[in-house]
Amino acid sequence: MLDRITTLQDDTPILIADGLGKSYGRLRACRDISFKLYSGEVLAIVGESGSGKSTLLQLLSAQLAPNTGSVSYRMRDGSTRDLAAMGEAERRLLFRTDWGFVHQDPAMGLRMAVSAGANVGERLMAIGHNHYGKIRATATTWLERVEISADRIDDAPRTYSGGMRQRLQIARNLVTEPRLIFMDEPTGGLDVSVQARLLDMMRSPVGELGLSAIVVTHDLAVARLLSHRVMVMQGGRVIETGLTDQVLDDPREPYTQLLVSSILPA
């Protein structure tokens, strides 16, 4: 078994969710969710389809506005800001600098018609880099870090396999060394061998950069390999939370026990 990421940087929350709720008419997708995410911590949000975990990720990343509660983020200057109080331009700046978002479908996180190098390089340009040679060199380095050959730098992502596209999306997100990265089913749709390779590759840069990360997944093996802490969702609520090994090895709630037993060999 691969060792899980183990480095935590400090005990200062980087993200605080307080009483989050989101409804669509009579459907309550998320209900009264509160937690703190710490610097250098990887949190997995797990549950079956329809549990509310993807809605929660959109709330936490300011892509959806909550009906109740708030999400606060600790800025680089140490101040804590309510995301809802930020202007749209400020939130876009966060996504170009402090944040990354890895989609399940890499086509949603990549520009499919331009080269792999341009996909990585344009995020550098968004934060002020303007020397072509240095941008290309950095892009090459990051492609190699995610196990994409440097001779594919000028190829468009549409010529890549699904696993390569996902690795390119990760390089695009990590090249600016963000402080927080959101991942929505990052291994979904990939076959088992590709999943294993991708997970092994992801752990290294996340650990080395000391990133905070929130990973939404229905796959408990992904949660075990990547996260320090797990939150289990059912029906829009968090029903169990704790250290990853504690929750997955000794689940308290019947629903969590059912999730865990479903991945055990018969």
Image (cartoon, rainbow, N blue to C red):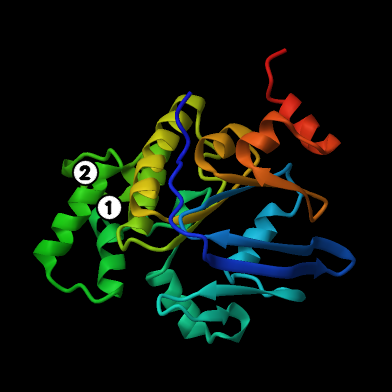
Amino acid under label 2?
Answer: Arg
- Regarding residue 154, the answer to whether it shows in the image is no
Relative placement, left or right, of 86 versus 89 is: right
State the residue lying farthest toward the top: 266
- Regarding residue 189, the answer to whether it shows in the image is yes
Residue 165 lies, in percent from the top left, at: 38, 45
Residue sitting at x 51%, y 53%? 41
Residue 142 higher or lower than 92, as above or below: above
User: At numbered mark 1, what does the secondary structure look like: helix, strand or loop?
Assistant: helix
Residue sitting at x 16%, y 58%? 136
Circle 2 sits on which residue?
A: 152
The mark nearer the N terminus, 2 or 1, is 1
Amino acid under label 1?
Answer: Ala
Q: Label 2 neighbourhood size at 10 Å, few (<14), some (14-19), many (20+)?
A: some
Circle 1 sits on which residue?
A: 116
- Can you tell which quarter of the image residue 201 is in? top left
Residue 179 higher or lower than 166, as above or below: below
Residue sitting at x 21%, y 39%? 149
Front-lying residue, 62 or 80: 80
State the residue lying farthest toward the left: 133
Residue 264 lies, in percent from the top left, at: 69, 20
User: At numbered mark 2, what does the secondary structure look like: helix, strand or loop?
Assistant: helix
User: Where does the C terminus fall, quadrant-wise?
Assistant: top right
Q: Are marks 2 and 1 in contact (CB under 8 Å)?
A: yes
Q: Label 1 neighbourhood size at 10 Å, few (<14), some (14-19), many (20+)?
A: many
